[in-house]
Image (cartoon, helix red, strand yellow):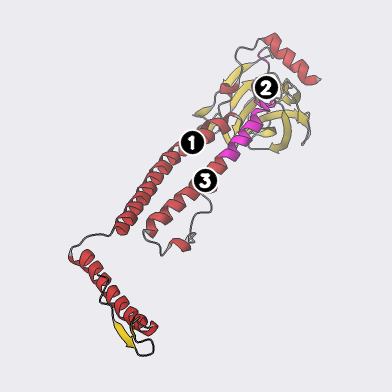
Amino acid sequence: MAGRRKYKYNPETLSYELQRPSLRYYLIRALIILPVSMVIALGYYVFYTEGLKLKTPRTVRLEREYNNARSNLDLINKQMAQSQKKLEDLQVRDNNIYRNIFGMEQIPPEVRDAGFGGTNRYPYLEYAENSALLMNTALNFDKLMKKAYIQSRSFDDVERVAGQAGEVAKCIPSILPLPEDTKNFRWSGAFGYRKDPVYGDIRMHEGIDLTGATNSPVYATGDGKVETIRYEYNGYGRYILIDHGFGYKTRYAHLNKALVYEGQPVKRGEQIGLLGSTGKSTGPHVHYEVIYMGRPVNPYNYFNNNIATEDYHAVILGGRQ
C-alpha cells in the first residue's frame, strides 16, 4: 500500500471524503527529509573514502587522466631532449662545415641561447600542481623553438651564399703571387715556426716567402678589394692587404712599389705591385699571407698545384682585362 488514507466526514454532503495533505505538510516534510538525506549521503561518502579507503569512480577517472597527462609530459620532455641533441649536431655542422666552406662567421652560443636567462617567463604556472615540471617543459619547448628558428635563418643565409658559389671560387686565393718562371724564383720561407733570419730567435712565420728579381710583378691571388696599403720600417715594409670577402684576406709584403690604391677592386691575376726588399728583409722577395676569419693560415693549402705555367699566364692576361 502507498500509505494509510485518511477520510473525514463532511456534514454538508453527509459523506466521508478523502483528506489530502496541505502544501505546508509537503514543505515541512521536504525540509526534514532533504537534510537527513544529505547527512546520510555525506556519511556514506566519508565512510566509503576515509573508512574503507576506497575511491569514487570520479576520483579514479581523474587520477587516470592525471597520470596520462603526467606520462605525456614526460614523453614530450624526452622527445624534446632527443630533438635538442639533433639540433645541437646541426649547429656544430653548421658552424664548423657549412658556414666555414663559404667563409661565413660562426653563430656564437650567446646568440643561439639569447633571451632565456634571468626573469621568470611563466608566473601563471607557479601555483599549478607539478609546477616545476610544467615550467621546465614550457622552458625547454621555447628554447627548442628559438634555436630551431635561428638555425633555420642560418640555413637560409648559407643557401643564399651557396647561390654565389661562383663568386666564392673567384675570391678564394688559389694562385701564387709570383709565377714560378719569374727570374730568380725560389721558395725561401715556409709557413710556421722558424728561426728568424734577422733576430735569430724562434718565431711564428705567418706566411710564405717567395724570392724573385727586384721589381718583378706581384699579382692578386683572388678577386677582391684593396683594403690597406701601408709602410712599416721594422716589419712588413710596403705591403698591400686585399679583402676577398667570404672571410678571406691576403697580404703582400716587402714590396718596392704598390700599383693599386685603397678601395680599388682587383681581379685574380691582376698586377698590384713590384717585388722589393723593404722593411725587415734580407733580400728581394714577397712575403705572402692568407688570412681566414682573422687568423693566418698556410697559403700552400690554397694553391692550385696542378695549374700549368701557361695556364697561370692565361689567368694573368685575364686579370689585365
Q: Amino acid at mark 1?
A: Val
User: Percent from the top left, x then y, of residue 126?
Assistant: 42, 63
Amino acid tagged 2: Pro
Q: Quadrant of residue 80?
A: top left
Q: Which residue is mark 3?
A: 145
The magenta-colored residue range is 152-180
Residue 45 position (above or below residue 98): below
Amino acid under label 3?
Met
Q: Earlier in the sequence, mark 3 or mark 2?
A: 3
Nearer-the-camera pick, 4 or 242:
4
Q: In this orientation, which residue lies closer to the viewer: 21 or 210?
A: 21
Which residue is rendered at x = 70% and y = 9% of the image?
A: 310
Q: Is residue 17 above or below residue 263?
A: below
Looking at the rendered structure, which numbered label has been put on residue 177? 2
How far apart are the alpha carbons under marks 3 and 2?
A: 48 Å
Per the image, is 247 magenta? no
Q: In percent of the image, x 22 and y 60: which residue is there?
A: 54
